[in-house]
Amino acid sequence: MRLLFSIASRQDPLESLLLEEDVRLGALMDTPNLSAILGLAPPPGVTPNFVDPDTREHLPKITAYVTLPPMVLLLVLRFYTRLKFTALGVDDSTGIDLCGLAAAAIVANTALSFAVCGHPAGPHQWDIPVDKFTLDYAKFELAISYTYFIAAIFIKVSILVFYRRIFGFARYANWLIWIGISSTVILYAVIIIFLAGFCLPHHEDYASGGILSPQSIERCLGVSGWATFVTGIVSVVIDAYILAIPLGFLTQLNTSRKRRASLCALFTVGFSALAVSIVGAVYRSRFLFGDLDSSWSSMYVYATQALLGALQTLGLDQQRTLSQTLVSEIYTTCNRKKCAGEFLLREDYRTAHTLMKPAGNSAYSLIVIEANYITMEERGYQLPELQTHRANSHLNRDS
């Protein structure tokens, strides 16, 4: 997005001289020689290279080759397992997995990135002639931005909806989850609408080149740097918020430090995704603070987008493992300190006996009962005894 409009953003005397010379020659030949105009004036002492310039186009490609195949494979296995052995759950959006929609958007975003990497993006911008920045390239750049926003919405909402199934029966957790879902959708929707209003061509732009018209370029250039920067900040804040929800439960467990540390190890994908999100925000901020070499710098942004999307999609399965382990630890704490009775559950989940009665309005006991009920319900077991206790637990909570 930023790369498209940085071409016309600033010209130093050298670039102006080159442009004037090209216009003078073009006047003699009736058509400007755009292949001789630099995309950006080079730094002092640097000679433009149109033949074999240094390039970073391989960065997004290598990232995609490493992360996308395992993401797609695990997603297919997840669909197969859940369709064959269980019913699709709420976080699968009544049969269409939100995670699958996110993966589709990530694949589309990656394909669009491949379309511009090396054609012409990747080299320094002064190593790219202006005639390489075509109308198709401009459309690809905008499409890359929009598919990234769509993928981010689906990924983050999918994780939060899954949290709601596990932790949403604690009232304060339910509020936190709904705040996260609504904030994610609203913030990204605002960014999408904002960019569409400024960067998509208006009716009057089509008479002078559409998206490449001078007024369209100037209009989008005025907001693209800020939009790119804000996108990075929003991503970091939401990712940190999502990671903090299960961590909040972890800090309240009455268990040893060693056991708590082992549980923290299950957050590796979440912490990695947050780190990638921060790195992406740093590179995005450069576009706001004077980095005009967008072709070169945007390769890091494309790489972090692909890596972040794949990590968060892959992390959904780790979140399931984490939540099951966390629920088990919560039960242990609940059984020792907060609840009367005991809750016995066989490892094969084929039979269950519940003797637990929540002590007062214990959110922990409700989580344990509900989480284990969901686990067994997904496996197709009919547990009337547990259903009765589940209903009684909700009555106790609401009383």
Image: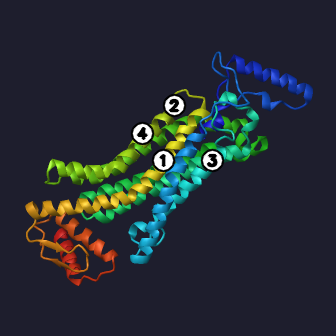
Q: How many marks?
A: 4
Distance (Cα) linking label 3 and label 1: 14 Å
Q: Residue at x 54, y 59 (%)?
A: 104
Residue 278 disc label: 4
Screen quadrant of the C terminus: bottom left
| Residue 299 pos. (x, y %) | 57, 38
What residue do we see at 55% from left, 35% from top?
225
The residue under label 4 is which amino acid type?
A: Ile
Q: Secondary structure at mark 2?
A: helix
Q: Circle 1 is placed at which residue position?
A: 307
Residue positioned 40% across, 66% down in the render: 91
Q: Above or below — where is 319 with respect to 280?
A: below
Among numbered discs 3 and 1, the one appearing first in the sequence: 3
Are discs 2 and 1 less than 8 Å apart at CB? no
| CB-based contact (under 8 Å), mark 4 and mark 3 | no
Residue that numbered label 3 is attached to: 114
Residue at mark 2: 286
N-term mark: 2 or 1: 2
| Residue 124, quarter of picture | top right
Mark 4 residue crowding within 10 angstroms, few (<14) / some (14–19) / many (20+): many
Q: Secondary structure at mark 3?
A: helix
Task: Give the label on residue 367, or none.
Answer: none
Q: Position of residue 40 (x, y in %)?
A: 67, 27
Q: Earlier in the sequence, mark 2 or mark 4?
A: 4
Characterize the local packing of mark 2: few (<14), some (14-19) or many (20 or more) Cα atoms within 10 angstroms. some
